[in-house]
Image: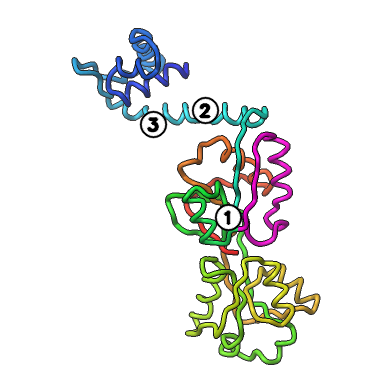
Amino acid sequence: MDLHHLRSFVAVAQAGHVTRASEKLHLSQPTVSGHLRALEGDLGVTLFERMSSGVSLTHAGRLLLEDAEKVLASAQALRDHARAIGGTLDARLRIGTILDPAYLRLGDLLAVMRERYRLIEVELHLAVSGVGLEKVKNGELDAAFLLGDPDDTDVRAIPLEPIRYVIAAPAAWRSRLKDWDSLARETWILPPPQGTLHQMARELLRSHRLTPASVMESDQESAILNLVASGVGITLMREPLAREREAAGEIFIWPEGDTRTTLVLCYPAAREASPEILALVRAVEDVWGKKTGARRPIAEGA
């Protein structure tokens, strides 16, 4: 099956007229007509009904049009990927980050991108939760690591790993935190309100009909952890990190509550077939050691 024949089929289907499609393809009308006859012969079906005003798809033509479009898109993706691997794809990727770079495997990801796609320039920008999602949607970022699922058809999201968050408090506060009321009376150290962790913490307290007495904001996980260890306030902390800090005697884990979310990478749905996004997705799949299978929506937190 010839891709030129498929392109002529799709062009004629979109134009509803062989001559107009020929002009768009910069081919002669007899050439395009020949492509259609050859494709119909290969497939064994009639794709168009010929009329004096143009052509219209037959039932078989309508059913096969989407398949033809997918084949052409896959062929273009193959060419783009070859360009990227060959070092001829010159592009820039602006990626929003959250949490700890090591946890996101950013070093490994950038190493893979540099090795495979030499001319793709990668920029990293700290962008918490809803901020990262909105910047992906408005074009300020090309992709972003997020926490949670925003259910937004404007983005595609790759789920990477489930995360359990626990309540972490200064080690010295173990004896003074007796119940949920005492937790709510303390200062909570959280990302800005757009951050998923901020929303998760408030929802956890709301489930006990409580709100935090005061909130101190920080958009950097390392700063939040330092403030908790220094006795400034309480936060939500990734469980493995909290266990490590608790073992070091810096914090203690409140035993009565936790919450869960998912780490994801999101990018614009409209750009899912672009060569630089395909290159990023392939690199993420390699670094995270699995075929991720991009789904629809998602959001983040810091």
Residue sitting at 52 percent across and 28 percent down? 76
Secondary structure under the numbered disc 3 in the rendered image: helix
Q: Nearer the viewer, mark 1 or mark 3?
A: 1
184 to 70, vertically: above or below = below
Q: Where is residue 22 drawn, in percent x and y?
A: 35, 15
Task: Residue under label 2, please give it.
Answer: 76
C-alpha gap between disc 2 and disc 3: 15 Å
State how many labels appear: 3
Secondary structure under the numbered disc 2 in the rendered image: helix
Q: Nearer the viewer, residue 109 or 255?
A: 109
Q: Residue furthest top?
A: 30
Task: Residue under label 3, please give it.
Answer: 66
Left or right: residue 35 compared with residue 180: left
First-in-chain label (2 vs 3): 3
The magenta segment is 97-126
Q: Is residue 291 magenta?
A: no
First-in-chain label (1 vs 3): 3
Q: Amino acid at mark 3?
A: Glu
Q: Residues within 10 Å of mark 2 (few under 14, many from 20)?
A: some
Task: Residue under label 1, please give it.
Answer: 264
Q: Residue furthest front?
A: 140
Q: Amino acid at mark 1?
A: Val
Q: Amino acid at mark 2?
A: Gln
First-in-chain label (2 vs 1): 2
